[in-house]
Amino acid sequence: MPSLESLEGLRREALRQNNSGRHREAAATYRRLLRQLDRYDAAAGVMPNPGARTLRVRALIGMSFTMTLSARPVDALALLDQAENIAGDRGDLRSIVHRQRGVVLANLGRVRDSLHEFDLAARDEGALTDMDVILLLMNRALSHAHLGHAAQAAADTDRLLDLADPERFPVERFMGTYNAGMIAYLAGDLPGALETMHRADTMAVEVPRAPGRLDHATVLLDAGLAADAIRVADSAVTEAAAHGQRLFVAQLHTLRSRAFLLLGRPADAYAAASAALAQLPRGKGAVEPRAAAQLTALSAQLDRGDAPRPIARRAEAILTQALESGSANVLAAQLVAAEAWLGIDPARAQAVIEGWQTELVVSLSNRLRLRHVKAASAIARGDQPTARRVLRAAAADLRAGQRTVASLDIGAARALHTVPLVTLDIEVALRSGPAAVFAATERWRIATAPMAAVRPPADDETAAMVARLRAAHAQLAEAPPDAAPGLRAGIRDLERAVRMRDWSSRPSASSLAPEHQITMSLARERLAADGSVAVSLFTHDGVIHALVIGDGRPRIEAGMPAARAEELGRRVMADLRMVTTTAAARRLGSVRAALAAELAELDAGLLGTLRIGDRPLLILPTRYVSGLPWALLPRLAGVPVLVAGSVTAALTPAPPAPARPAVQILTGPGLGTGEREAEAVAGAWRSRGDVHVDSNASGAALRRALGSGTHVHISAHGRHEDQSPLFSRLDLADGPIFAYDLQDGGIAARSIVLSACEIGGSTSGPGEGSIGFANTLLALGACSVVAAATPVPDDLATDVAGHLHRGLAAGATVDVALASAIAASGHDAGVFGAFGRRC
């Protein structure tokens, strides 16, 4: 007969196997343990040892856990029923059975039922070991959080972290920390959630990471970081599949499907949902996880244009099942059904979501989806006031979320969630005319703009990562061709690590001032005061439209297809790179001819009937043409052009210029004309300001200059990184300084000029959010920025700089000074643009 000590050893071995993700091995060990317990009980006769009874209950609980992860919840629950019968009147055993039943139900999305089981388990808490109390509190806290019980979730989490000493309970400490991150997210603390999850990830403990990465990807997706969520989920799928965790594999594929939907890729979304369904058995066993995957598949079908009525009916059938079982799929099913009904029966769409209080929905993306359905159904009923109120509330909700994060990365990414709302708002506004369109476009330009967010200085670990990133760039510059791919891969890994740290940063109190939207009548007054015209571009039905203000009565003109404008923009940028960087290309008439034709087509398609003359132009681009060098459009030759994120921001009065400005001139390495350029800028200001020249500028010198100078001129090579815009950089004496580096200090400069580089670019996603070096400077407080969209020859940069600063020193605004500089320096100088406000 086996001894109790040997049987307990088997149980501990199975537990270690489960904790390390080796669930198939754990199941085999539990089966072996149960067989040996049968032998033990047979030898013991009618009076089995109480220790054997405990081992059998715990073995059945362990087996139920492996069944749950293998997507066999019916079998898991049957094992727990068996364990409950064996537990009998033993309070400690009854408690752990109830706890495990709660875990199974929570994994199935039946959160209210799971909480009931956890509360039953807590009745016998006094009979439990510390380990069992920790596991109970960990799981109950999550159920409370998912149901919006913030105080109860926080109380349970605090208790479990107090109990989970990292020396005695390292695995439980890891799991509790990750859960604390999820609870922070459910309480609305996005930076806190990401910081806590990152802290858990750094714990040196052998434990499966797929469950935590599922939570991590969920938070990233709600932040709008869809591509990052897919990357995290992909790595977790590989691990979960290797350990036979079919349930987690399915849930991860479902999340991937939702991310692809957010990115506007319905075919990929449908494929991911199908991959999730392939992991889950049909029948009663995995109803809730299957329903979650089916709902994302239905959304993908709706997005790709399938007939909506069958989709709506299937979603309603899933909704009925979810309501009967108390599943967490209720809101998702309501949203899919309502979105499907919108186009065919708006009243039914409204009825499906009736009763939801939007403010109580945890996920920002779900709140925005819910408001979209409410607004769309109100429009269909002819209730315009309700629709406008809901749309304003949606924009305010997003803006409030922007105030809670310091990361410009997240601030720009969240625009992804607004695409349907912006489309709807503009569609409604077009029925009412220019004033309504102005209000709608401004509303979303302001809501999706990253807040001016100064964050605390980077911690030592992050600072060390950034230092390694600079060193890696220096190595890459000197590396032989065969070493470059490995160095680039290392750079990308470091960039991802720094971004992850950046996501958890919180803004300082001084960065929370809201931006109040101006009316069109006030905009017209301010434009008329300086004789300016504004053109606000927006997209409707795949066509770029222009709202023109200041050229006669406000009007809206339909322009060119957005896809065509985007393609022309790419061609313009490619041709400009050839023209400005290749000596031979300057003599190739075919390149310039193609460039001229592309610019002429963009001019006609974007500016319509605009009669600009020589009046200053304020341009508000849409993402399809966000990086266009506007000064090169034929109609804008010689015209002062200012590019801005919103009319409200652009027309906010600039602070008065000091009587004697401080002018900071910084030069980086590798510029053939750097000294001449610095002298040209200094010469423009010497009689009018206090000039300081740093001919060997470091990153620290740049940060000091931005915080203290009135006008800052930076003559340095740089690069816009389209795939990692926060790591767009300027090359200075001590290595590159990244856009990321600037976020831990405010910017006081009235104007910033970036010459001899292509640092004026920005990266835009499917929403209207964009990010780049110039955007970062503006978000952190710069009044205006001048930068080039493509690489610029040193001699051209020097000519533009001298003329530009002579204009600024004479009192011209940045757009007027730049227009004069371009006219004096030649056609190719039109790659420079002025951004921000008219300072």
Image (cartoon, rainbow, N blue to C red):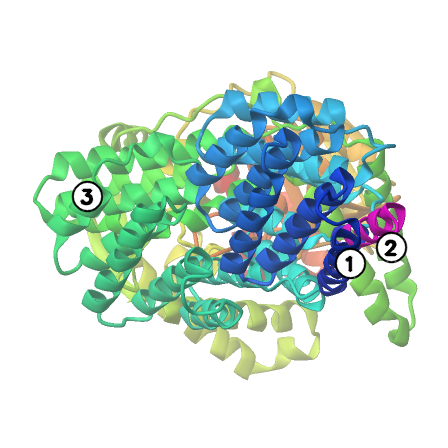
Asked whether disc 1 touches disc 2, contact meaning CB atoms under 8 Å apart, the reply is: yes
The residue segment tinted magenta is: 1-15
Q: Give how far across and how far down residue 243 sits, in percent.
A: 71, 64
Q: Which of marks 3 and 1 is nearer the N terminus?
A: 1
Q: Is mark 2 on a helix, strand or loop?
A: loop
Which residue occupies 66% across, 59% down? Answer: 236
Q: Of the residues tagged 3 and 1, which is closer to the observer?
A: 1
Q: Mark 3 points at which residue?
A: 434
Q: Could you say which quadrant of the image residue 519 lies in?
A: top left
Q: Of the residues tagged 3 and 2, which is closer to the observer?
A: 2
- Residue 175 to residue 587: above or below: above
Asked whether disc 3 touches disc 1, contact meaning CB atoms under 8 Å apart, the reply is: no
Which kind of residue does numbered mark 1 sit on?
Arg
Mark seen at residue 2: 2
Q: Earlier in the sequence, mark 3 or mark 2?
A: 2
Q: Nearer the viewer, residue 51 or 723?
A: 51
In the displayed structure image, the side of residue 222 where residue 799 appears, left or right: right
Label 3 packing within 10 angstroms: few (<14), some (14-19), many (20+)? some
Outermost residue on the front side: it is 46
Which residue occupies 64% across, 39% down? Answer: 503
Residue 709 visible (yes or no): no
